[in-house]
Image (cartoon, grey):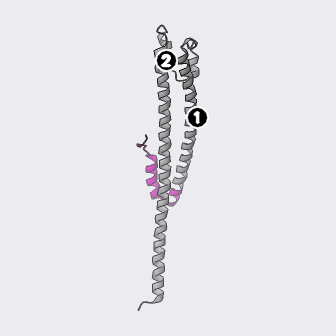
Amino acid sequence: MINTNHCLFLFVALSLGTFCACNSSDAAAAIDAEGQELRTAACRYRCQMDELHQASKVLWDSVTLHLSNTLPSDMPADERKNMVAVRNTALIQMFEIYPTLDSSIQQAVENAGLRDVEIAQQMRTLKDSLDTNEAGIQAFMGKLEANSPEQAAAWRNKLVQVTCANCQ
C-alpha cells in the first residue's frame, strides 16, 4: 500500500524538479535572448557605419571626378593633384583658382560640404549608439562571469567575433 505521505513527497519533489528545470531553461533562454539582441544591435550599428563611410566616399569621389574634369588644363600638375585629393570643402575653397571655377563645380563642392556635415553628424550619433551597445555588452558579460563562467566564455566568442555578413 502506498503511503499518502510518500505520494505527497514524490509529488512535491517532482514539481520542484520541474519548476527548477523550467526556471533554469527560462534563465538560459533569457540570457540567449539578451545576448542575441546585443549582438544583433552591434551588427546593425556596424553595418550602418559602413554605409555612412561608403556614402562619404561616393560623395567625395563624385566631387573629385567633377573637379578633375573641370580644372583648367594649364593648371600646375602639383596644384591640380592636391586640389583633387582634398576631401574638404573649406580646404578646396582655399585654392587660389577656386573663385574662377565654373559655378556648377563650386555648387557641387558646397553641396558636398553640407552633405558631409550631415554624414559626420550621423556617424557621431551612431558612435554613441555603438558605445551604449558596448557598455550593454560589458554589463551582460559581467553578469555572466558572476553567474556562469562557461556561458560567459561562449558568449565572449560570439560577441567578439561579430560578423555582419548580412549587411545590405
| Image spot of residue 12 (x, y percent) | 48, 79
- Name above or below for residue 168 compared with residue 149: above
Name the amino acid, label 1.
Answer: Gln
> What label sits on residue 121 in the rendered view?
1
Q: Secondary structure at mark 1?
A: helix
Residue 152 shown in magenta:
yes
- Residue at 58% from the left image edge and 30% from the top image edge: 117
- Residue at 49% from the left image edge and 52% from the top image edge: 37
| Image spot of residue 24 (x, y percent) | 47, 66
CB under 8 Å between callouts 2 and 1?
A: no
Mark 2 = which residue? 67
- Name above or below for residue 138 compared with residue 57: below
Name the amino acid, label 2.
Answer: Leu
The answer to which of 87 and 106 lies nearer the viewer is 106
Q: Secondary structure at mark 2?
A: helix
- Name above or below for residue 20 compared with residue 154: below
- Residue at 46% from the left image edge and 69% from the top image edge: 21
Q: Which residues are magenta?
A: 143-168
Quarter in which the N terminus is drawn: bottom left
